[in-house]
Image (spheres, rainbow, N blue to C red):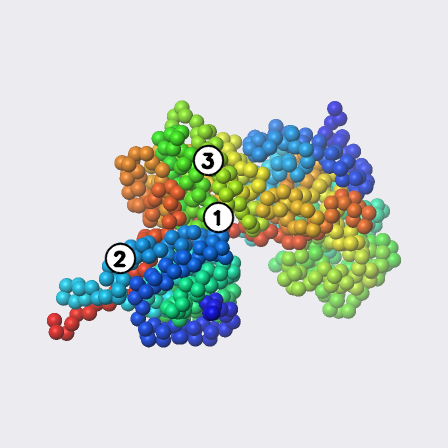
Amino acid sequence: MEALGERIDRLLAGPPYRTPPEERSRALLDILKDELANACARHPGLHNYVHAWPCDFQCAGRIADLPYLPAAMLKAQPPLSLVDPGAITRTLTSSSTTGQQPSRIALDSPTARRMTRGVVAVAQDFIGSGRRPYLVVDVPDSIRGQQELGARGAAIQGLHPFATEVTYCLNQGPNGELTLEQERLFEFVRTRSHSAVLVYGFTYILWKYLVTPLLAQGITLDLPEIHILHSGGWKRLQDEAVAKPAFNAAVAQVFGCAPDRVIDFYGLVEHVGIIYPDCPLGNKHVPAFGDVIIRDPLTLQPVAAGEQGIVQVCSVLPTSFPGHLLLTEDIASLVANDGCPCGRRGVAFRRIARVPMAELRGCGNIDNRRAP
Amino acid sequence: MSDFTHIIDSPAQLSAAAERMRQTLMATDLTANTVLDVLANWATALGSPETAEIPGVAFLRLWLRRTTLESIITRELGSRALHAAWIEDGRGRLKAFPIGVVGHWPAGNIEIQPLLSLTCACLGGNASLVRIPSALVNPTRRLMQKLDEADPQRVLAGRVFMAVFDHARLDLQDAMARAVDGAMIWGGKEAVLNVRALPFPHWARLVVFGPRVSVAAVDADTWCDKHERKSWCRRLARDVWQFDQQACSSPQVLFLESRPGISTAEFLQDLKYAFEAESRLHPRQTIHPALTSAICQARASWLLADTANRAIFPATPDWTLLVGRGSAIPKPTQGRTLTVLEVDDLWHPISRFDGNVQALGLAMSNPEQEARLASEAARRGVDRIVKLGRMHLFASPWDGLDLIRPMVRMVRQVPSTE
């Protein structure tokens, strides 16, 4: 029987969005079952969890029936790992709100390699495969961690394979405040105008530290061949009443390009290796090596097209941590199971928001106890 | 046709409503007997199809019966209080008078709670200003419509004002607190602390209920009895289901006395069947995604934490049994998630209770053992020790407090001729 790694690599090598959904589901289901069996053999806690599931995963006829793990379980310390500690080459950490534990993702070399290939396969379907100058709207310290890398660093580094050179255009002051290095930015633009350029930044950082100050000064950069990728969520922009069309128009105005050059993508550190950029119709698509299931909160069954639910992400890429089937804390709507006019096959969805913080309600709500 | 519920936008609306009700109180005396007649009519009216399906209405109808409330009045205020008569007391005499306008801040998770709170104050002859949590506006409006129909003499119409405003409107919360002479505050920690900090008049009497948890316990003889245990499992499932396990009287954990050499597997199977049956009988109509998320996380973290732990649950978030050993009360998940913990002796968990435990639901075969555990639980802060299946029976005292007496003044008169 073909080794698991080879089967994953074969999926990675193909075009990410051309496989018919049924064919893709069959291929994924077999691999995911083997990965679950592997995870159970390596982690007694996971074995306990999977075997308490209401149905035997080996008998599952669809991905939606496989046991999934809440993504919050990856906040465990030490990290949930499926490999020996000596095999872990890097630990990714998620951004976390104050007082919350970040997720900690243990990567070994094969998983890290597949993660990079996954991001490249997805991204090149949207921006092309050529290498180009890469402008990062962040500070160089974002990727300095050797053993541990945060969410911003992971996103920045995931796009390195497209770079001929990397320029960071923000500075960090002594109190942690970020500022735009305008001279460095203008120098970057001066020598690369009218050539292909890649820009990446966290959505809010891009808006606050580059777009807003340049808009205020009436500055337009002359980079019509640019692709601007951004990620990290819209909550803080929504708080400032900035909607996506206005954001895209403002970013395009500042960079001197068309608004369709601005691409928002959805991604999770816990699901590293797969990103979900917006297609021209504003939908997000699933590559051949993963899947997305939107689950009805009332039944936890997959929703029909047009309905909203909790997002479950699936990926065959990780073998060093149990990130194959993760129930996220995001809400999305299922646009279609196939047939997006952009031509990409399979599920098309749109992220709506985070699930609000789970909290106890009512007079049965005790979240702390009397000190002993 | 009047409507008791009012959308509030300015502090003046609240102070004006309180002032109107205060004038009504001064103008007319209201006996408990008269209130009981109105409430009994209301109980009948609530049986109509428009309200019968609102969660908790079956219980509310029982609560509003004359026999139920009369016994509470008699116990708390004496039998003559029904007719607003003075009671001889040594050289003087005593009579219960209303404290005035009572503000009610009910919890947002129990449809009938605004009305339970309201009736306690009404029976003391008070007027009531009730803030309706946003989630309860619709059911409250429907329930109050039935009161309107049941009260053609408009006995309570001038004494009840249901106010609808966003909980974040501090100016309105302040105005409501300033306008009342007493308050009944129910709910979770944050809500209770916020309300208690409002600028009440210095004479205002505050009664606070919650937040607390409740616990069930079953001894080995009971669960080993194959004939009896199915019935106990059904009772426990009912206690878990009511109020979606969000009430302070909802059991969050079951302590199960183990018996050497006998597996609890058959008992757990019966408990599973009871949960499935209750779920079929009372299927969830809606759920907040955060609760679904919390239920999924509770299942996973329980099973990942210890390979000796077990769990039983369906593919849906409908219910969950988390099974293990231990004497500590775990952090509640709610949403019909019951942790079943085996212990060698029920004394061990009960002797660790603190003031957080409101009710202990028991299924015991040995009365002496039950009495011993009940005494220990009471010493440890438990206020209600009841039979499993009756954990939500709202009766006086609740949380160790009388329900009517805190909102009346016992006025003593000693005649000058004495």
Q: Is residue A106 left or right of residue B281?
A: right
The residue drawn where x is 38% and y is 33% is B228
Task: Give the alpha-carbon distance from disc 1 to disc 2, as whole Å.
Answer: 33 Å
The residue drawn where x is 35% and y is 60% is B120
* Quadrant in which residue A192 is drawn: bottom right
Q: Which residue is mark 1?
A: B244
Q: Classify mark 3: residues with Cα within 10 Å, few (<14), some (14-19) or many (20+).
A: many
Work out which residue is located at the far right of the displayed protein and give it.
Answer: A194
Task: Give the alpha-carbon distance from disc 1 to disc 3, as whole Å.
Answer: 17 Å
Q: Amino acid at mark 1?
A: Asp
Disc 1, SS: helix
Q: Which residue is more in the foreground, B29 or B302?
A: B29
Q: Which mark is residue B51?
A: none
Instruction: Count up the numbered dots.
Output: 3
Q: Which mark is residue B271?
A: 3
Q: Amino acid at mark 3?
A: Leu
Q: Is residue B111 left or right of residue A218?
A: left
Q: Which residue is more in the foreground, B263 or A368?
A: B263
